[in-house]
Each structure stands twice: as structure tokens, then as C-alpha cells.
Amino acid sequence: MSGKTLKVTLTKSLIGLSPKQEATVRALGLRKVRQTVTHEDTATVRGMIAKVPHVLQVSHET
């Protein structure tokens, strides 16, 4: 999976999330709604995304 990246966008507010879910979103580097970050396509990042898929939008970049 090396060389591939994921574009992750926060689509919903962090209000109402559990503290663990909020910490996961913040660890991805997302602070504001509609903010976008890019990450390497690794198992660690995919696991973090899998914990909060209802507030994120993920697209692939090559």
C-alpha cells in the first residue's frame, strides 16, 4: 500500500461523539467541519477511519 494516500474530510460536527471518537478524529488532524487532510494509506489510519465512518468522507489519491 505504499505510495498511496487517502484524503479524509470531516463532514459532521464532533458534538455528540464519545470522548474516544472525538480523540480519534482529532488524532487524524481534523478540527473543523469540512477540513481535509491527507494521510498515507496504512492499516493504522484505516483503523482510525473505521472507528468514526459516520462523520468522515474518504477518497483515494494516487
Image (cartoon, rainbow, N blue to C red):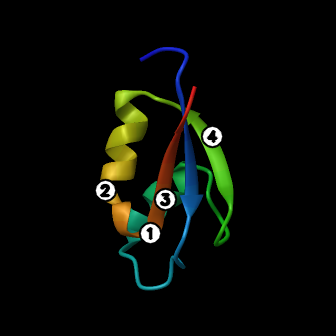
Query: Which numbered circle lies on residue 51?
Result: 2
Q: Residue 18 occupies which quadrant of the picture?
A: bottom left
The quarter of the picture where the N terminus appears is top left
Q: Which residue is mark 3?
A: 57
- Image point 38% across, 65% down: which residue? 21
**Residue type, numbered disc 4:** Thr
- Whole-percent x, y for residue 57 in the image: 48, 59
The residue type indicated by label 2 comes to Lys
Q: Position of residue 44 (x, y in %)?
A: 38, 33
Q: Residue furthest bottom?
A: 16
* Rendered position, 34 above or below 9: below
Which quadrant would residue 17 be assigned to in this image?
bottom left
Of the two numbered discs 4 and 2 on the same chain, state the one appearing first in sequence: 4
Residue drawn at 54 percent across, 70 percent down: 11
* Residue that numbered label 4 is attached to: 38
- Give the mark toward the camera: 1 or 2: 1
Whether residue 20 appears in this view of the structure is no
Q: Is residue 54 above or below residue 60?
A: below
- 57 to the left or right of 38: left
What separation in Å lies between label 4 and label 2 (alpha carbons)?
17 Å
Query: For numbered disc 3, what is the local secondary structure?
Result: strand
Q: Earlier in the sequence, mark 1 or mark 4?
A: 4
